[in-house]
C-alpha cells in the first residue's frame, strides 16, 4: 500500500466528515484578514488569539487604517499577546502594501513572503487560503502529524529536518484544494493528533502510523536544540507624583517590550537580597528610610528569557533631573498605555484598578 496515498485519502475523509473549527478570517478569502489572523496566531493558541483578532478587525477594518494607526494604540491592542515585534511588523507591512501595492494585498507567494514579519509558513497560509495557490503550510501541528505517521526522527529544528518536512508536506498537498488540505492538516494536529493526549484509538491513520506501531507517539516530533533560558532581574520604582499619578517610561531599546510603558527600572545580572538594596537606593540619591514598600518577586516566562522583577515604592520626592524621559500619568489614563503583562498583573494584584 502506498502510505502517502493512504494518508492523503484518509485525511480528506476525516476532514470532509467533520465540522471545521470556526475561523472568521477564512470567510470570503480576504487576504488582509487572513494575514492579520496568521500574524496574531503565531505562537498563540486559537482561543487566546481569536478575541485579539476580533478587536483588531474592529479597530482596523482595512489595511489603510492599520497603516495609519498611532503606535501607542496599536501596541495597546496587542498588550498581552507577547512577541511585540509582530505588531510593529504588521504596521510596517501595512504601510508597504499601501505604498508599493496601491493598497491591494499582493497575490503571489514571493511578494507575500517579502513582507516584514512574514515567513514561509505565513506566506504559504495566505497564498493558499486567500488565493488557492498550491503551497503547503508547515507549523507545529504539521510537524507532529507527519513525524508520527512517517516515524520521522529528524529533529524539526535541524536543516535536514526542515527540508524533509517541507518537501513531504508539499508532496502530500491536494493540488485541487490546497486551502482545505492545509486546514485539514492543522485541524488534525490540533484536535486529533494532539501533543500529549492524541486520539490514537479512533485515528483514521492508525493502520499505517509509524509512531503508533512502536508506541512512540509521545516521543515525536524530536527537537535537536535545547533552549537556553536567560534570567533577567528587573527592579522597578513605583514613583508617585506630587499631585497624583505615577511615572512611566517608554521602552525604546531594541529588546523585549519595545514600545511598551513601564515604571522606571534598573536591570541587574543577579537577584539582590534585601540587605543589598542600598546600592539601588543610592542610585536615586535616597536613604533607606525613604522606602515605603518592597514587593516580593514577580515573574514572567518568555520564550528564551525569564523576567524576575521586584517593585520598590519610594516615599521621598523625586529628583526631577532623573526623569527626563518619564511621563507622569494619572491612573485613570493608564488604559491608553500599553504595559507588559508582568506590570499589568502586578498592578491588578495591588487592586489599583486602572482598566
Image (spheres, grey):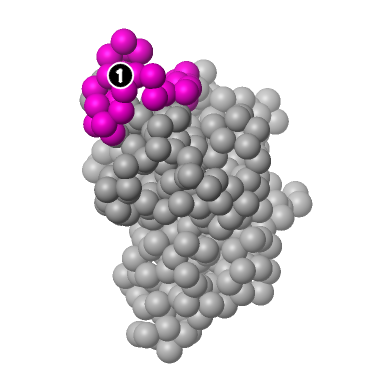
Q: Which residues are magenta?
A: 272-299
Front in this rendered view, residue 76 or 333: 333
Image point (56%, 51%), residue name = 330
Query: In the image, is residue 29 part of the stretch drawn in magenta?
Result: no
Image point (56%, 25%), residue name = 196
Q: Is residue 334 above or below residue 24?
A: above
Q: Is residue 276 above or below residue 266?
A: above
Image point (40%, 37%), residue name = 317
Give the number of callouts. 1
Q: Position of residue 293 (x, y in %)?
A: 48, 22
Q: Hey, which residue is sitting farthest bottom in the picture?
A: 102
Q: Position of residue 237 (x, y in %)?
A: 40, 34
**Residue 140 seen anywhere in this rendered image of the structure:** no
Q: Position of residue 283 (x, y in %)?
A: 24, 31
Front in this rendered view, residue 51 or 247: 247
Q: Position of residue 261 (x, y in %)?
A: 43, 49
Give the secondary structure at mark 1: loop
Pointer 1: residues within 10 angstroms few (<14), some, or many (20+)?
Answer: some
Query: In the image, is residue 275 part of the stretch drawn in magenta?
Result: yes
Report which quarter residue 271 is drawn in: top left
Q: Which residue is mark 1?
A: 277
Image point (32%, 47%), residue name = 320
Left or right, 20 with respect to 330, comes to: right
Amino acid at each position: 500500500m502506498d502510505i502517502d496515498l493512504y494518508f492523503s485519502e484518509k485525511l480528506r475523509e476525516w476532514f470532509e466528515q467533520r465540522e471545521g473549527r470556526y475561523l472568521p478570517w477564512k470567510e470570503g478569502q480576504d487576504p488582509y484578514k487572513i494575514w492579520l489572523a496568521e500574524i496574531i496566531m503565531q505562537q498563540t493558541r486559537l482561543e487566546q488569539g481569536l478575541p485579539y483578532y476580533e478587536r483588531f478587525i474592529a479597530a482596523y477594518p482595512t489595511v489603510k487604517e492599520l497603516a495609519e494607526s498611532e503606535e501607542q494604540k496599536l501596541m495597546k491592542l496587542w498588550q498581552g499577546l507577547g512577541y511585540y515585534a509582530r505588531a510593529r511588523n504588521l504596521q510596517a507591512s501595512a504601510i508597504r502594501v499601501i505604498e508599493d501595492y496601491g493598497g491591494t494585498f499582493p497575490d503571489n507567494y514571493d511578494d507575500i513572503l517579502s513582507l516584514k514579519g512574514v515567513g514561509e509558513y505565513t506566506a504559504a497560509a495566505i497564498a493558499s487560503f486567500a488565493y488557492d495557490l498550491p503551497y503547503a503550510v508547515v507549523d507545529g501541528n504539521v510537524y507532529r502529524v507527519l513525524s508520527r505517521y512517517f516515524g520521522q526522527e529528524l529533529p524539526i529544528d535541524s536543516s535536514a529536518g526542515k527540508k524533509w518536512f517541507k518537501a513531504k508536506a508539499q508532496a502530500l498537498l491536494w493540488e485541487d484544494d490546497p486551502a482545505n488540505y492545509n486546514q485539514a492538516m492543522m485541524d488534525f494536529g490540533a484536535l486529533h493528533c494532539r501533543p500529549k493526549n492524541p486520539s490514537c484509538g479512533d485515528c483514521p491513520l492508525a493502520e499505517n502510523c509509524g509512531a503508533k506501531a512502536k508506541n512512540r507517539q509521545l516521543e515525536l516530533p524530536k527537537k535537536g536544540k535545547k533552549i537556553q533560558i536567560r534570567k533577567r532581574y528587573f527592579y522597578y520604582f513605583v514613583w508617585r507624583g506630587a499631585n497624583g499619578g505615577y511615572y512611566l517610561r517608554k521602552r525604546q531599546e531594541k529588546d523585549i517590550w519595545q514600545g511598551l510603558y513601564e515604571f522606571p527600572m534598573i536591570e541587574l545580572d543577579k537577584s539582590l537580597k534585601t540587605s543589598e538594596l542600598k546600592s539601588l537606593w543610592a542610585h536615586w540619591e535616597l536613604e533607606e528610610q525613604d522606602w515605603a514598600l518592597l514587593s516580593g518577586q514577580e515573574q514572567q516566562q518568555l520564550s528564551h528569557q525569564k523576567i524576575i522583577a521586584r517593585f520598590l515604592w519610594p516615599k521621598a520626592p523625586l529628583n526631577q533631573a532623573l526623569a527626563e524621559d518619564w511621563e507622569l500619568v494619572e491612573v485613570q489614563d493608564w488604559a491608553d498605555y500599553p504595559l507588559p503583562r508582568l506590570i499589568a498583573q502586578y498592578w491588578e494584584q495591588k487592586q489599583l484598578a486602572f482598566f
